Image (cartoon, rainbow, N blue to C red):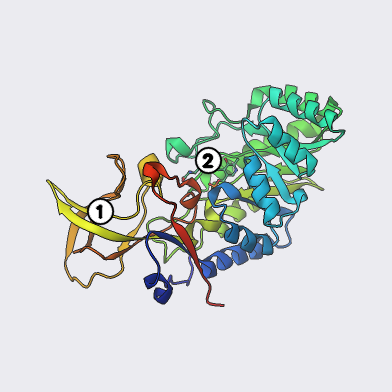
Amino acid sequence: MGTTTHRHRFAMEIVNQSDTPFYYYDMDVLHATLDEISRLTAGFPYKIHYAVKANGNPHILSEIKRCGIGVDLVSGGEIMAALKAGFTPHDMNFSGVGKSDWEIRLGLEHEIGCFNVESVPELDIIDHLASLMDKRANIAIRVNPDIDPHTHKNITTGTAENKFGIKIKDLEHIIHRAIHLPHIHLMGLHFHIGSQITSMQPYVLLCETINRLLDHYDSQGIHFEMINVGGGLGIDYHEPDTHAIPDFEGYFGTFKQHLHLRDNQQLHFELGRAIVGQCGTLFSRVVLVKENSKKFIVLDAGMNNLIRPALYEAYHEIQNLTSRETTNEVYDVVGPVCESTDVFAHDRRLPVTHRGDLIAIRSTGAYGESMASTYNMRPLAHSLFHSSK
Ligand code: LLP
């Protein structure tokens, strides 16, 4: 992963005054991340869209908006949230395998930048709805490149047995159909191979696939004004302080080196986790410590606040910020929800922990708050923002 000198420091005066559980966002980390992206993409025909599904908190959205990047959206709700945060429709992409009519109409009404289309039926529906509104929809075709990114099976999206995108062998047909539909403007091709990808190899394979497709369509005289390579860049869940900023150098460098963009062709990225993952921490207090055949730390945060460990067996660093004990103990760290999967960590070594200790669950800025629910009728966690400026 990339290196950074940023050292995470929580503003404890704010933290100590707040009722737990809550999400704490370090806006310095967010800004440093966004600055690194602009530094590495300046001077290239690159455009970044933030994948709002990672975190749609209005405050986060407006900070990201101020940095001048666009958004990748997957529902009508996200379109409305992005409009409210002040994003211009031109900077919006709308992805998703099953867009409802009202969501498509909302996108058409605002003349959003691009619909990422995942099937022939969807293409025809968009053309039809656009004709009724006397509009022309900008679209990209989502290609399923059949590349395995070697991440968790539940967050792999670009392999052949997946529901997403169009197989390469069916691409020719949909492209020619799109070109001839009167209410469709075909802008380009869209790809997304998966999430939490930390090796650059799958991206090299993606570039090679795209190069082959571009050569093929060049020979037919078909030019794409835009190529969208999706998102997926991973973060370091094990060392959130030493690697607060993801390996953007390796990531953008891979596309700079391996993808042969044509003249007048823009490259779009849709990053979610890499932008917001490390700025967020879920704070919780220990309700009690109990012992069965194992020792359990029971928190006041549960899987309704952060579902990633239960859903993907995801690892998050867990820190006891208040224990003064000098010895460690091995614990299962669990929530209060009535489900045996409500476990944040199995067999985690932590300082001896007591009731009332303050616990930080790190790297939860992405897919934490945005996947929260009120299961067990538990209230949603509130959020706090800290910026040193
Ligand atoms: N573009 C498309 C079409 C996507 O489906 C996704 C994520 C992204 C961009 C952004 O991917 P990112 O850069 O954040 O990896 N809830 C899971 C992750 C699901 C990702 C879904 N698609 C998790 O907590 O790990």
Identify which amino acid the numbered label 1 is placed on.
Val
Decide if ligand 1 comes within 8 Å of the CB at mark 1.
Answer: no
Ligand 1 falls in which quarter?
top right
Crowdedness near tag 1: few (<14), some (14–19) or many (≥20) residues, C-alpha within 10 Å: many
Q: Which of marks 2 and 1 is nearer the N terminus?
A: 2
Tell me if residue 313 can be seen: no
Residue at 65 percent of width and 27 percent of height:
168
Which x, y percent locates residue 292?
13, 47
Q: Residue 265 carries which label?
A: none
Residue 171 sits in quarter: top right
Residue at 52 percent of width and 44 percent of height:
201
| Left or right relative to 52: residue 279 | left
| Left or right relative to 336: residue 112 | right
Residue at 29 percent of width and 55 percent of height:
299
Q: On screen, 30 above or below 101? A: below
Residue closest to the eye, 176 or 117: 117
Residue closest to the eye, 376 or 40: 376
Residue closest to the eye, 112 or 14: 14
Alpha-carbon span between mark 2 and mark 1: 33 Å
Residue positioned most to the front: 377
Label 2 element class: loop
Which x, y percent locates residue 163?
55, 27
Q: On screen, 140 above or below 357? A: above
| Left or right relative to 185: residue 329 | left
Residue 262 sits in quarter: top right
Which x, y percent locates residue 91?
73, 51
Q: In which quarter of the image is the C terminus?
A: bottom right
> Where is mark 1, residue-wise?
298
Decide if ligand 1 comes within 8 Å of the CB at mark 2.
Answer: yes
Residue at 55 percent of width and 34 percent of height:
158
> Where is mark 2, residue-wise?
194
Identify which amino acid the numbered label 2 is placed on.
Gly
